[in-house]
Image (cartoon, rainbow, N blue to C red):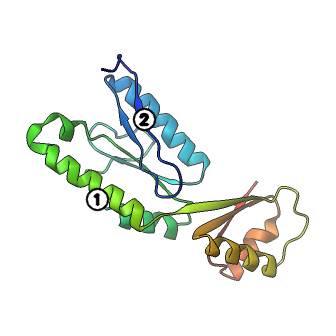
Amino acid sequence: MLAAGEATVVRPTGVGRHLCWAFTDRAGFLDRARAFLAEGRAAGEQRRLVGADLTGLDRFPALPVFDPAAAMAAALAAGFTGLRVVVDATPLVRSPSSRADFAAYEHLVDRSAADHPFSAVVVDGAALEFIDHRSLLRLADHARGRGATAVLRTALPAAARLADLRRVPGVRVEAR
C-alpha cells in the first residue's frame, strides 16, 4: 500500500527504457510528470502527453492515443535526441473491463522500445576551437557503430553550418 503521493518507480537501464509509476495522489503524479518532462527537455527529447486531463502539462496538447514506433521515428526525423512520453493510464487500470486494453497497450510500448531502441551520444565541444567536415563524419561513424545519434554541444558556429551543408547523418549540433 502506498502512502498518499508516494510513487513506485520501475526504472530499467539502457536503451529502450520504459518507466512505470504508481501514485495514490494525482498532484504527486503531475509533479513527477513535470520533472520527467523537464529532464526530457534538457536532454533535447521530444515530449508527448497521452491521456485525459494532461493538456497544458508541458505547453502542448495531450493526444488520445499514439503509435510508439511512429512517434519515435517522427521525433528523430525532426532532429530530437529521442522521445519522452507521459501517459495517464488511470482510466484503463481502474476499469476491470479495460485492464486487458491496458495490458495490450503496455505490451505494445514494451515491444516498440525493444524493437526500436535508441540512445544519443552527447559530446561536450565547449573547448573546440576548430572543426572540419571530416571530424563530423568520424563522429557520425562513431555514433552509427553504437546505434546512436551524436549530439555535439559547441559554441562554434561553423559546426552547425558544416553539419547542415554536408548533411551529416546521425549528428545533431546544439549551440552552447
Q: Which residue is mark 1?
A: 108
Q: Secondary structure at mark 1?
A: helix
Residue 129: horizontal and vertical position, in percent? 91, 64
Classify 77 as above or below 61: below
The foreground one among 170 and 20 is 20
Q: CA distance from mark 2 to mark 1?
A: 20 Å
Report the residue at 80% width, 76% height from top.
Answer: 135
The foreground one among 39 and 1 is 1
Q: Residues within 10 Å of mark 1 (few under 14, many from 20)?
A: some
- Can residue 156 be seen? yes
Within the image, what quadrant is residue 173 found in? bottom right
* First of labels 2, 1 by sequence position: 2
Classify 81 as above or below 48: below
Residue 132: horizontal and vertical position, in percent? 83, 77
Q: Residue furthest right?
A: 129
Report the residue at 63% width, 75% height from top.
Answer: 145
Q: Which residue is mark 2?
A: 9
Q: Mark 2 is on which residue type?
A: Val
